[in-house]
Image (cartoon, grey):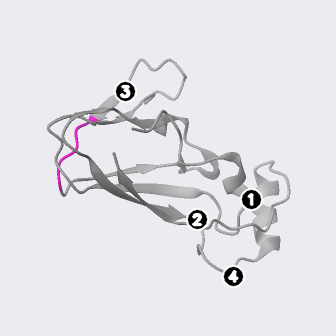
Amino acid sequence: YYKEHHDVNGDDFYQFSGPRMITFFLYLSDVEEGGATRLTDLKGDDSHSLFLDVQPKKGMALIWPSVLNENPMMMDERTYHEALTVKKGRKYGANAWFYLRTYKGNDCDINALDAIGQKYGEEESEDDIYSSETDLHDE
């Protein structure tokens, strides 16, 4: 299982690809008991008073935003999530992340990226890129 986490971290905003905009998670198996994906704080206020558990079902997909519509340079605090423990059976899933810009290569205009960061009060960007854009999970 995976503990509570977010699919964006602070460094994402300084990558050529920009932040992960959307997460797509596909369930590749049914799970007999447990194994739900929990969106842990839908209010985004650290109260954890409103959450959603989604039970795995083969062929079903979850899609959620990682950033705010009105400001893609800000993380959406409502989409922290975790994978609950599988009590019976096996859970297989695959995810893909959709980024703000082209994922591979240096096709990004670094000056334009800096301008976006400055518009939203961010520091200048760095020129690192991610090494992986998809993960396969066996839980």
Quarter of the image with the C terminus in it:
top left
- Do the residues under discs 3 and 2 have CB atoms within 8 angstroms? no
Please determine whether, in this image, residue 23 is positioned above or below residue 74: below
Residue 122 highlighted magenta (yes or no)? no
Q: Position of residue 44 (x, y in %)?
A: 52, 29
- Do the residues under discs 4 and 1 have CB atoms within 8 angstroms? no
Name the residue tied to disc 1: 14
* First in residue order: circle 4 vs circle 3: 3
* First in residue order: circle 1 vs circle 3: 1
Q: CA distance from mark 4 to mark 3?
A: 39 Å
Q: Dot 1: few (<14), some (14–19), or many (≥20) neighbours within 10 Å?
A: many
Q: Dot 2: few (<14), some (14–19), or many (≥20) neighbours within 10 Å?
A: some
Please determine whether, in this image, residue 122 is positioned above or below residue 43: below
Q: Residue at x 74, y 59 (%)?
A: 14
Q: Position of residue 126 (x, y in %)?
A: 81, 63
Name the residue tied to disc 4: 107
Q: Position of residue 106 (x, y in %)?
A: 71, 80
Residue 53 is left or right of residue 17, and the answer is left
- Asked which secondary structure carries label 2, the reply is loop
* First in residue order: circle 1 vs circle 2: 1
Q: CA distance from mark 4 to mark 1?
A: 14 Å
Q: Which residues are the magenta region?
A: 54-58
* First in residue order: circle 3 vs circle 2: 3
- Please name the amino acid that badge 3 sits on: Phe
Please determine whether, in this image, residue 14 is positioned above or below residue 129: above
- Please name the amino acid that badge 4 sits on: Asp
Q: Which one is in front, 106 or 94?
A: 94
Name the residue tied to disc 2: 100
Q: CA distance from mark 3 to mark 2?
A: 27 Å
Name the residue tied to disc 3: 51
Q: Quadrant of residue 131?
A: bottom right
Q: CA distance from mark 1 to mark 2?
A: 11 Å
